Image (cartoon, rainbow, N blue to C red):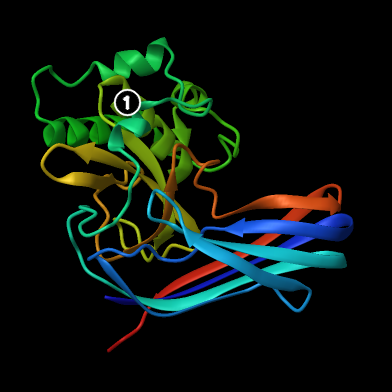
Amino acid sequence: MRLRITHHTVYDYERPVSFGVQSLRVTPSVFEGQKVIDWQVDMGDTSEAGAGYRDGAGDWVQLWTIHGPISKVPVRIEGEVVTTDLAGVLRGHREVIHPMVYLQTTKMTEPDEALRDLAAGPEQGLGDLDLAHALSHLVHEKVAYRTGVTNGLSTAAEVLAAGGGVCQDHAHVLMAVARARGLPARYVSGYLHADAEGNIHEAAHAWAEIHVGGLGWVGFDAANATCPNDLYVRTGSGLDSRDAAPIRGVTAMGGAEKLEVTVAVSRVEA
């Protein structure tokens, strides 16, 4: 499937920014499931692209420098990607970090008693793949998709207690229970053209990847009860949403900030 992505973000600062450095992890991943046709990132006339590098997880990171004073900083991401359905398997992705690194918990994914109880649900003795599917199914059942229930700082424990959340929250809960059962798991950021019901997605998306013996990394989108297919575009990964943030950095001055975000993922007919 050929998908066109338009992702525009404007940072509106309380006070003008005199200087800043941003780290962008927004370039589609390189693996057999997707091929970039065109991809452009721009931060306006007051910003300058710096060094870029591929990190140990195989993600492309681009540094940008902001030269102020400026009150609004735009980030424009546009491009086209051809995707292939690999049933969630991250085939052909080159990285050097050992999967066992992703067994470590973070503040966002630290399991409490309720998460450990949820993780214990699937029977013992299941193979890695069956266990991963069972855990994803449980998270989908226990965490309803509801906006306004959580925020960007909500932990997996808080999400499970609330019984609802958005895609970021489903990913954190699934990662927490997978790690509790000894399966390495990580957070993945990217885009989704449409959900399981065919509703067009108008925001960036997130899901989890679980390392499965014999297959490697396999994606699980517990929010939509599916594995990523050709409707998905993968851009980056990390230990949790903070670690995998598409845009992060530091600014001098600026103060409080507001965000305006528009995302469109459309299918391009051949």
Q: Which element type, helix, strand or loop, lies under badge 1?
A: helix
In front here: 90 or 143? Answer: 90
Crowding at label 1, few (<14), some or many (≥20) Cα neighbours within 10 Å?
many
Q: Quadrant of the C terminus?
A: bottom left
Please tell me whether residue 266 is drawn above or below residue 159 in the rendered image. below
Q: Is residue 131 visible?
A: yes
Position in image of residue 229 (x %, y %): 24, 60
Residue at the disc numbered 1 = 179
Q: Residue at x 25, y 21 (%)?
A: 181
In front here: 174 or 243? Answer: 243
Q: Amino acid at mark 1?
A: Arg
| Figure quadrant of residue 131 | top left
Q: Residue at x 8, y 19 (%)?
A: 125
Q: Residue at x 41, y 76 (%)?
A: 266
Q: Is residue 17 left or right of residue 105?
A: right
Q: Is residue 51 left or right of residue 144?
A: right
